[in-house]
């Protein structure tokens, strides 16, 4: 078995790599910046320097791979959906030309809508393209990452986070490490075939009000959330220098999940994972707020 892992230094990928190593596997890691791998990890993996948007490079890097953990890289430019499309081209060519038998794809709650959910539309396109290959595919429909709060450190320090969802609207929140555990078990298992969708919902659905209360209780930083209009958010993001396409892609991830949206996969014992927000905040966010480390700003 040859297992390849993309985004191996990301919020989820780094845990997948470590779990595979502990399971006795030497994974092949596709890294845009191999120097970000810790030296002890680097000694236990096969490293291939590759940009996931370079189709030919991805095909070459995945030759001989039997199972692949694929994460569409977080978009960094002005046209997020175009970047998702390029990443999709890479994984589809790699799966088809290398005959990769099993793929675990990190998707998101909301991808089931297929359109109208901003950046998540890009993940939906990847799901559809993978489904059209001969590979057995598991789509991980993940809830809101706890680690998204790392992008809000300055706002948390100021005491207020502006949000687009109603503050009493509950959605799944999940720890990246728990996503990695689900991904790793799927990569190591060889009994499943066909198309599978596995939701990863975390231990509980949370409102933004509950999130703020938890951050306040654990860190001592008094935090409130304020719902603002889509247009007000557009003004804030435009002032930060974002392109119109990037702004709409970000806003769509929230606006597309309003109006009575219900995830396709219901919360069950199969979708619920153990790490609580309070535990994650204490371990990860509190040290960042206290200035003890820069954090990892990558969403995946």
Image (cartoon, rainbow, N blue to C red):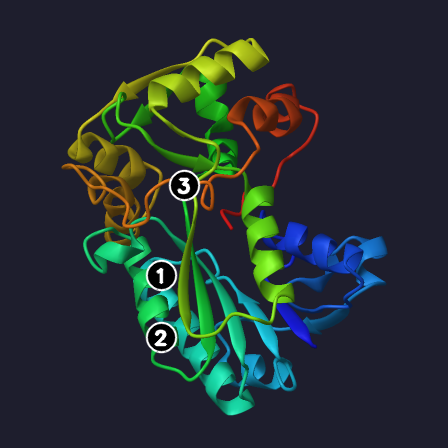
Q: Is residue 51 left or right of residue 200?
A: right
Label 3 vs 2, first from the N-terminus: 2
Which residue is identified by label 1?
123
Query: How far across and down, in percent of the image, does residue 188 sit?
Result: 65, 65
Q: In the displayed structure, would residue 155 be above or below residue 96?
A: above
Q: Where does label 2 land, which residue?
A: 131
| Residue located 72% across and 59% down the image | 20
Query: Nearest the camera: 242 or 177?
Result: 177
CB of mark 3 within 8 Å of CB of mark 1?
Answer: no
Which label's residue is closer to the chain start, 1 or 2? 1
Of the two numbered discs 3 and 2 in the rendering, the one whose residue sits closer to the viewer: 3
| Quarter of the picture holding the N terminus | bottom right
Whole-number angstrom distance, CA of label 3 to CA of label 1: 23 Å
In the current view of this chain or complex, which residue is farthest to the bottom? 97
Q: Which residue is drawn at the image coordinates 37% and 65% (left, top)?
A: 84
Q: Nearer the viewer, residue 162 or 7?
A: 7
> What x and y, as percent, mark residue 286?
61, 21
Cα–Cα span, label 3 and label 2: 24 Å
- Residue named by callout 3: 268
Q: Where is residue 284? Give x, y as percent.
A: 63, 29
Residue 8's quadrant in the figure?
Answer: bottom right
Mark 1 or mark 2: which is in front? 2
Q: Residues within 10 Å of mark 2 (few under 14, many from 20)?
A: some
Circles 1 and 2 in contact, beta carbons < 8 Å: no
Inspect this view and state whether residue 31 appears: no
Q: CA distance from mark 1 to mark 2?
A: 12 Å
């Amino acid at each position: 078995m040859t297992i390849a892992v993309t985004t191996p230094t990301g919020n989820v990928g780094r845990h997948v790599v470590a779990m595979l190593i502990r399971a006795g596997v030497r994974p092949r890691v596709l890294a845009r910046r191999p120097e970000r791998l810790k030296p002890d990890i680097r000694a236990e993996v096969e490293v291939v320097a590759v940009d996931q948007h370079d189709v030919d490079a991805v095909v070459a890097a995945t030759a001989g791979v039997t199972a692949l953990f694929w994460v569409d890289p977080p978009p960094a430019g002005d046209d997020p959906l175009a970047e998702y499309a390029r990443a999709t081209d890479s994984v589809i060519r790699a799966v088809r030309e290398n005959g990769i038998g099993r793929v675990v794809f990190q998707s998101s709650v909301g991808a089931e809508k297929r359109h109208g959910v901003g950046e998540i539309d890009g993940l939906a396109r990847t799901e559809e393209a993978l489904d059209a290959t001969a590979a057995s595919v598991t789509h991980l429909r993940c809830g809101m990452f706890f680690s998204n709060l790392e992008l809000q450190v300055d706002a948390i320090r100021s005491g207020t986070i502006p949000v687009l969802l109603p503050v009493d609207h509950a959605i799944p929140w999940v720890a990246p490490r728990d996503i990695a555990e689900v991904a790793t078990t799927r990569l190591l298992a060889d009994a499943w075939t066909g198309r599978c969708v596995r939701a990863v919902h975390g231990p509980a659905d949370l409102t933004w009000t509950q999130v703020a209360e938890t951050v306040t209780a654990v860190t001592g930083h008094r935090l409130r959330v304020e719902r603002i209009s889509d247009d007000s958010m557009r003004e804030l993001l435009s002032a930060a220098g974002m392109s119109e396409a990037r702004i709409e892609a970000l806003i769509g991830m929230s606006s597309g999940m309003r109006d009575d949206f219900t995830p396709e996969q219901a919360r069950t014992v199969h979708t619920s994972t153990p790490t609580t927000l309070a535990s994650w905040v204490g371990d990860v966010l509190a040290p960042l707020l206290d200035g003890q480390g820069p954090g990892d700003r990558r969403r995946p």
